[in-house]
Image (cartoon, helix red, strand yellow):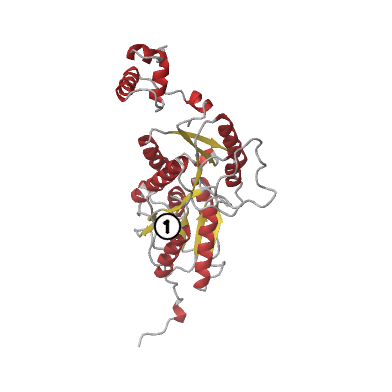
Amino acid sequence: MARRPTIKDIARRAGVSQSAVSFALNGRPGVSQDTRARIRRVAEELGWQANSAARALSGERSGAVGLVLARPAHTLGAESFFLRLVSGIQEVLAAAGTALLFQVVEDVDAECAVYRRWWAERRVDGVLVVDPRTGDPRPALLAELGLPAVTIGEPGPPAPAGLAPPAVPGSLPPSPPLSSVRADDAGAMAQILEHLHGLGHRRIVHIAGLPGLAHTVRRMESLRAGAERRGLGPDRVRSVVTDYSDTEGAAATRRVLAEPRPPTALVYDNDVMAVAGRAVAAELGIPVPHRLSIVAWDDSALCRVTHPRLTALVRDTAGFGRLAAEELLSVIAGGPTGVRESERPRLEPRESTAPPPRILIPEPFLEPPP
């Protein structure tokens, strides 16, 4: 195996002492500008990189941030949202020379255990927190650890007293409330309902994602409030929850379309479920959009290549990731915590939505022509 270059190698090549190399590479005074430039040039020629473990032990930054995803692994393979989100995050981190440490776990308890381990090992300088929940224990834990963090999405209400994680012995004083970047989920759902109601739909079902996620709750509440303002009760407009997978999206579609008074419009919380629901409608012989309208929450290539093309909510998911990464790097550098708003999603009407079918009146009740 090739041997990694050391400070000793740099000192020998540059003709200086090892202490001079340490001063130059760590940006400390004690060497002239010419010597510093020569040392750095030699270090680059040799391919030298600082040892992150040694930096952590000395109290310096690790040069990495963490992202833990607590979702069933089988739901991640087909969903494009997280791929686009991570691409935006990585774009900012790569430009800053910061690594992304990514891990998938089964639940929030396991996620909290990862944060404790990363904090104890000084593995990351901060973390990006996804899928804010109602009664979320993670903000209290991260504040207790003093680990810089940014929540991607508007945080839900805090964990009730007694359910927050216990204090960590020897931890730093609690940090200010976490920064967050958020999208207007309630406003986006209001756009969808306005579109469908304007077309004449009065029986709408929202095939939602995981229950307990703060954005799922906001979408459901926005739909319910908008329906009530229009005089539509839960017998006409409602939400059903799933795990975001195509399997559960298809199963939920099959159930609601088998009801005595099935919906005339379906709103799906991601593109994968929307395409699966479209396939179920085709299997059941239900034409889209002539008897059933379909809306996908996140636009993607899937929505645009499906026939008919799916009406979808368009948002800059990669830009959302870039905004979150920029905010985290700012907080790590000592900047203030705060809330940053992403660009508001917009609805892109396509061929999968149309007015609902008119109720046919039996022949005996039709008035004779004049």
Give residue 348's position: percent from left, percent from top: 35, 58
Q: Quadrant of residue 167?
A: top right
Give residue 57's position: percent from left, percent from top: 53, 26
Q: Nearer the viewer, residue 173 or 197?
A: 173
Which residue type carries mark 1? Val
Residue that numbered label 1 is attached to: 295
Side of 366 where 68 appears, left or right: right
The vertical placement of 109 against 154, above or below, is above
The vertical placement of 101 against 183, above or below, is above
Q: Nearer the viewer, residue 345 or 54?
A: 54
The vertical placement of 238 against 144, above or below, is below
Q: Secondary structure at mark 1?
A: strand
Give residue 284's position: percent from left, percent from top: 47, 55
Query: Where the C terminus falls, by quadrant?
Result: bottom left
Q: Residue at x 47, y 51 (%)?
A: 338
Whether residue 284 is visible: yes
Give residue 176's position: percent from left, percent from top: 55, 48
Q: Nearer the viewer, residue 297 or 89?
A: 89
